Amino acid sequence: MSKSTYNTRQKQVIYDYLLKNNQLLLTCDEISDALKKSGNPVGKATLYRFLDSLVSSGDARKVM
């Protein structure tokens, strides 16, 4: 995660989940559901914005 961005607990939870599941293709709904089940719910708007920032920085890829 880039040091120039403001880090929150929610962003860290998302980032950690993605690192642990980096071999999988995941939808936003799958990520959201998994985080909710783990007791770390994250708002969908936060999830989408953070994923967009990861794609923009080259830390994640978007598959359509």
Image (cartoon, rainbow, N blue to C red):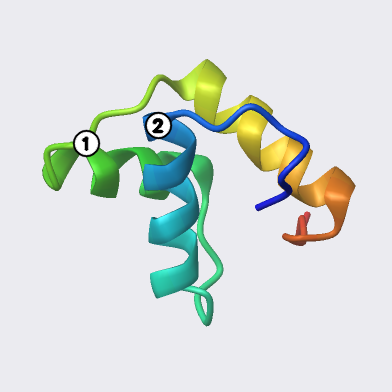
Give x and y (percent) for residue 49.
66, 26
What residue does disc 2 label?
10
Q: Position of residue 28 (x, y in %)?
A: 51, 42
Circle 2/circle 1 CB separation < 8 Å: yes
Distance from Cα at disc 2 to Cα at disc 1: 8 Å
Q: Amino acid at mark 1?
A: Asn
Quarter location, residue 39? top left
Observer-nearest of 49 and 12: 12
Q: Which residue is mark 1?
A: 40
Residue 20: give x, y in percent of width and height.
39, 72
The numbered dot on residue 59 is none
Q: Quadrant of residue 5?
A: top right
Please name the residue shown 78% across and 54% down the image.
64
What element does badge 1 sit on?
Answer: loop
Residue 31 place in picture, x, y as percent? 40, 48
Mark 2 closeness class: few <14, some 14–19, many ≥20 residues within 10 Å = some
